[in-house]
Image (spheres, rainbow, N blue to C red):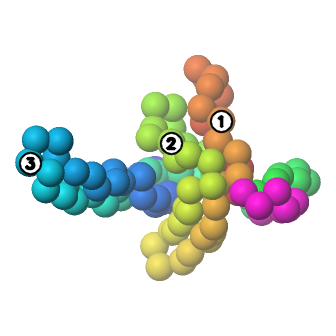
Amino acid sequence: MDLRRPHILTFTLPGTTGGEDPVTGFPIPGSDGDVVTVPCRYVSASGKVFKNQDNVEVQQRGRIRVPIGSIMPATFTHLTVTEGDITHFTGPALDVYAGGHLTGWRIDV
């Protein structure tokens, strides 16, 4: 177990929608998104106010730090952070930052 990242972040990538085969006209089924798990560190934090999809103000509950180069969720993706049998957080990603080379990447929730 990595003591710097004792928690596990879990989310599902968006799937693909179905369609129609242009040649035969038969329907093509869509596919479900892949489930992603990433080691992380969850820290309770407050102070920032974000707006959700309905433009309603939401208070920040915490921050998730992930290793540089990890697969990152899109804003408003439903996330779950666990440590063994304990669930520390479940809810939407409010802000995703995947930028700096040395500082690590973060997700505000």
Question: Which residue is disc 3 drawn over?
Answer: 24
Q: Is residue 4 visible?
A: no
- Secondary structure found at label 3: loop
Which mark lies nearer to you, 2 or 3? 3
Residue at the spot 88% in from the left edge and 51% down from the top edge: 48
Q: Of label 1 and label 3, which has the lower sequence position?
A: 3
Q: Amino acid at mark 2?
A: Met
Residue 89 vertical placement versus 5 (above, below): below
Count of residue discs: 3
Q: Amino acid at mark 3?
A: Thr
| Left or right side of 26 for 73 | right
Question: Which residue is disc 2 drawn over?
Answer: 72
Residue 9 vertical placement versus 84 (above, below): above
Category of crowding for the residue at label 3, using alpha-carbon neighbours closer than 10 angstroms: few (below 14), some (14–19), many (at least 20): few
Category of crowding for the residue at label 2, using alpha-carbon neighbours closer than 10 angstroms: few (below 14), some (14–19), many (at least 20): some
Is residue 58 within the magenta segment? yes
Q: Position of residue 36 (x, y in %)?
A: 38, 54
Q: Position of residue 44 (x, y in %)?
A: 75, 61
Q: Position of residue 102 (x, y in %)?
A: 61, 22
- The span picked out in magenta is 53-61
Question: What whole-number distance in Å separates the C-alpha atoms at marks 2 and 3?
Answer: 37 Å
